[in-house]
Amino acid sequence: MFKISALLLAGLSAVVLTSTPARAQAPAAAPAAVPASCPALLKHSFKRLQDDVPQDLCQYAGKVVLVVNTASYCGYTTQYEGLEKLYAKYGSKGLVVLGFPSNDFGKQEPGSAKEIADLCYNTYGVKFPMFAKTVVSGANPNPLHASLIKATGKEPKWNFTKYLIDRNGKVIEHYPSKVTPEDKQLVGKIEQALGG
């Protein structure tokens, strides 16, 4: 009986000894999972549409980013479908679409956050990140749009203006509202930025 107890104790000690180094090494592996440094363009935080929880845009560092100012009651509102299809098709390859509802143009986004979220999710099946209603043009645009305007020299003129940003945080292109998410030129630029 003593031999069995000694063997069990030795076995447990071996388990403890072999598992301890693995646990000790785990923290060393964690820094590898930290994303690349955050480009200046993404060093902003915005509240999430559905619950007002602040979101640091640095979480999208290293991705290709398509920034779009949106509105619920616009002739271009159906572009939500195309934007979601882009996100679904290229999201796993590194594309993220960021939606910024704005009431700047034609007062076409008058609703509450809940009303906007309901339209996005229930009508258009939007799963890409959406942020709280914001100002994207004029004298006081939000900090991200101010940076985008400065980088391109082009301010949004209407709802569903798009800015494409590469993995390094550099603005590639500005697209006016009439350029749809299915536009071959836009899709081509996204594929190029993704690396194929």
Image: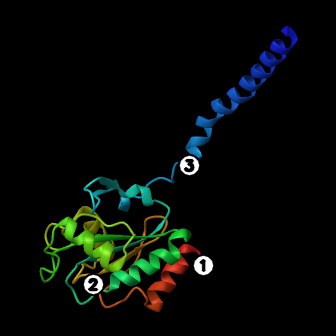
Query: In whole angstroms, how far apart are the C-alphas of marks 3 and 2?
Result: 37 Å
What amino acid is found at the position of numbered circle 1 in the picture? Gly
Query: Quadrant location of the C terminus?
Result: bottom right
Q: Is residue 137 above or below residue 81?
A: above
Q: Which residue is mark 2?
A: 77
Query: In whole angstroms, how far apart are the C-alphas of marks 1 and 2?
Result: 29 Å
Q: Earlier in the sequence, mark 1 or mark 2?
A: 2
Q: Position of residue 104 (x, y in %)?
A: 15, 76
Labels 1, 2: front one = 2
Disc 1 element: loop
Query: In whole angstroms, how far apart are the C-alphas of marks 3 and 1?
Result: 24 Å
Contact check, label 3 and label 2, Cβ < 8 Å: no
Labels 3, 1: front one = 3
- Residue depicted at 24% across the width and 82% down the height: 159
What amino acid is found at the position of numbered circle 2 in the picture? Thr
Q: Which mark is residue 48?
A: none
Q: Earlier in the sequence, mark 3 or mark 2?
A: 3
Q: Which residue is mark 1?
A: 196
Q: Is residue 66 above or below residue 57?
A: below
Q: Which residue is mark 3?
A: 33
